[in-house]
């Protein structure tokens, strides 16, 4: 980054900038590092935002390859123009700041930094996004969907009506690039968490219009309905070709021996079906939490088509003891077997530290 600015700005002190950044980088986490880089860059830039924006654009590297279709996220250091656009352009230089975000998102997604503008200037920013939805650069088109996601991970909340982006999703769902359609599917999955009927009706509408390739739309539907599928939502499962009134018999059994934090939960599931049908098999883990609370997570196990047959499925699930996003605690736990949204078998077990012993019981549901 120092080299980029030294090339663009004749008086840029690259050595000083580099030294300042590195002196405080190591102890910070990812997003705090980006803010720190912006802090260190500011003294080297013009004090007025329009001139600063010109400098930031002059130092931008080449645009991300427009010939690709996906997985071209860019480099995190190129998030800095977005940070400075919010800091110095949000209140008094809205249009110039949005121009800067437009240029910057072709190098690194500005999904975090468009959101303050949506909150502060909802109508004006939405008007820009409407225009950008037809842009020739697929990174700009993706920003339209990704930046307005109601539940974008790590990002600040947007206060616009969550149904406001739907007309733009109607347009973008037919996009030819997977990078855009994945964002649209993720956006619809966000909506499904609080308005499942809206998500379902949109997918039905898109299917009926036929503007997107059938294979791509089927992929989008699976991705958009993943939360509802985990919840056993009947309409979502039916849309994907799975019937919830499936006739099966099933058992689930944990391998002998203690189940320990830091170890592996190994189990075997046996499923007997009596007629040809599509099946979607998940397993649901219920975790003991402090204060008597119970955590719940759903994991994929098997999907496909089966006839009158028995399926024997084996799984080893790692129980990481040092995960930063989910902490395990000793105590009573349960695993359920879910087929086409229906719980068909379960088994209870005690999760213990390494030195303790465990027993478990098994029962079958029909």
Image: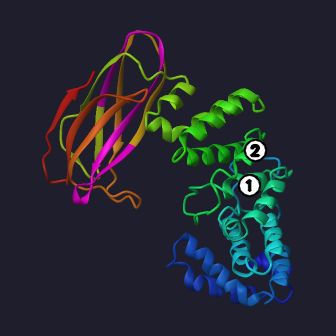
Whichever of labels 1 and 2 marks the residue nearer the N terminus, that label is: 1
Above or below, 101 relative to 133: below
In x, y percent, where is residue 94?
Answer: 79, 74
Q: Residue 317 falls in which quadrant of the image?
A: top left
**Residue pictured at 69% horizontal, 56% vertical:** 73
Q: Main secondary structure of the magenta part?
A: strand
Residue 10 included in the magenta stretch of the image: no
Label number found at residue 102: none
Secondary structure category for the residue under label 1: helix
In x, y percent, where is residue 360?
Answer: 16, 37
Residue 284 included in the magenta stretch of the image: yes
The residue nearer to you, when weighing 114 against 6, is: 114
Where are the magenta residues, as a range?
268-297
Query: Do residues under tags 1 and 2 come within 8 Å of each other at their CB atoms?
Result: yes
Secondary structure category for the residue under label 2: helix
Instruction: Specify whether 137 is left or right of 213.
Output: right
Instruction: Specify whether 348 is left or right of 302.
Output: left
Above or below, 196 relative to 324: above
- Residue picked out by circle 1: 144
Above or below, 265 relative to 84: above
Q: CA distance from mark 1 to mark 2?
A: 9 Å
Colour scheme in the image? rainbow
- Residue picked out by circle 2: 172
Q: Residues within 10 Å of mark 1 (few under 14, many from 20)?
A: many
In x, y percent, where is residue 233?
Answer: 47, 33
In x, y percent, where is residue 174?
Answer: 76, 38
**Residue pictured at 45% horizontal, 38% vertical:** 230
Q: Residue 103 falls in which quadrant of the image?
A: bottom right
């Amino acid at each position: 980054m120092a080299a980029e600015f030294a090339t663009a700005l004749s008086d840029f002190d690259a050595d000083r900038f580099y030294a300042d950044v590195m002196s405080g980088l190591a102890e910070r986490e990812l997003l705090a590092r980006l803010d720190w880089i912006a802090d260190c860059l500011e003294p080297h830039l013009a004090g007025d935002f329009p001139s600063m924006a010109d400098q930031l654009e002059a130092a931008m590297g080449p645009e991300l390859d427009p010939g690709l279709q996906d997985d071209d996220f860019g480099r995190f250091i190129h998030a800095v123009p977005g940070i400075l656009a919010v800091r110095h352009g949000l209140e008094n230089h809205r249009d110039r700041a949005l121009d800067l975000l437009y240029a910057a998102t072709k190098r690194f997604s500005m999904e975090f930094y468009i959101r303050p503008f949506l909150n502060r200037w909802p109508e004006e920013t939405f008007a820009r996004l409407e225009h950008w939805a037809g842009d020739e650069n697929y990174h700009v088109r993706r920003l339209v969907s990704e930046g307005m996601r109601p539940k974008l991970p790590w990002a600040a909340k947007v206060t616009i009506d969550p149904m406001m982006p739907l007309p733009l999703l109607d347009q973008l769902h037919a996009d030819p690039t997977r990078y855009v359609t994945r964002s649209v599917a993720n956006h619809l999955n966000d909506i499904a968490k609080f308005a499942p009927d809206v998500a379902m009706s949109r997918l039905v509408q898109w299917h009926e219009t036929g503007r997107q390739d059938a294979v791509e739309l089927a992929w989008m539907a699976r991705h958009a309905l993943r939360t509802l599928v985990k919840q056993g939502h009947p309409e979502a499962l039916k849309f994907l070709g799975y019937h919830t009134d499936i006739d099966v018999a099933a058992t689930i059994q944990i391998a002998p021996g203690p189940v320990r934090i830091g170890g592996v939960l190994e189990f075997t599931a046996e499923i007997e079906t009596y007629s040809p049908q599509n099946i979607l098999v998940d397993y649901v883990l219920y975790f003991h939490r402090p204060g008597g609370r119970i955590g719940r997570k759903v994991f994929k196990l098997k999907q496909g088509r089966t006839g009158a047959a028995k399926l024997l499925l084996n799984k080893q699930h790692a129980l990481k003891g040092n995960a930063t996003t989910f902490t395990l605690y000793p105590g009573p736990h349960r695993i359920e077997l879910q087929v086409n949204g229906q719980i068909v078998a379960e088994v209870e077990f005690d999760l213990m530290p390494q030195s303790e012993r465990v027993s478990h019981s098994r029962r079958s549901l029909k």
